[in-house]
Image (tube, rainbow, N blue to C red):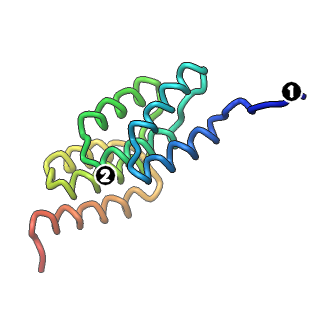
Amino acid sequence: MEQGNPEPTICICNIVIDALCKYGNLDAAINILNEMKQKDIHPDILTYNSLIDGLCKLGQWEKVTTLFSEMVNLNIYPDVHIFTILIDGLCKEGKVEDAEEVMKHMVRKPFHNSAHILLKAWIRLCVVQGYSR
């Protein structure tokens, strides 16, 4: 066996990207994504979950849109977690109409537990819009 630094794996990259995103260092996380691509390490749904979550929390919607499109173009389809991140982030930013569009797209996809997620999202939308009883 060769001594030295082991080759990075998708698992290691995802852990580092997630940690960087949680600490708000999105530029470094995106640099790792770019390095992964150069080293032919294919990002997966977890990679994009972390990046999109971090970008949503910083309100960087243009980058969110770019990464989301990139993900879909790579045939990595959004899961319930991604939709939840998007809806939550959009609602917190007051972008209710955009959140509703994401929800409409989500309804067209067959997800496990989607009814629970949709209910939580609609409740959040109602709170953001000021509807309460």
> In the displayed structure, would residue 53 be above or below residue 40?
below
Q: Which of 7 and 41 lies nearest the eye of the viewer?
A: 7
Does dot 2 land on a helix, a strand or a loop?
helix
Amino acid at dot 2: Lys
Nearer to us of marks 2 and 1 is 1
Structural distance between the alpha carbons of marks 2 and 1: 41 Å
- The residue under the point 39% across, 41% down is 26
Residue under circle 2? 57
**Disc 1 crowd, CA 10 A, few/some/many (<14, 14-19, 20+):** few
Q: What x and y, as percent, mark residue 51? A: 42, 42
**Disc 2 crowd, CA 10 A, few/some/many (<14, 14-19, 20+):** some
Residue under circle 1? 2
Q: Which of 105 and 56 lies nearest the eye of the viewer?
A: 56
Amino acid at dot 1: Glu
- The residue under the point 66% across, 34% down is 9
- The residue under the point 23% across, 62% down is 122
Q: State left or right for residue 7 relative to residue 32.
A: right
- The residue under the point 31% across, 38% down is 64
> In the displayed structure, would residue 61 be above or below residue 37?
below
Q: What x and y, as percent, mark residue 84? A: 35, 53
Q: Is residue 88 visible?
A: yes
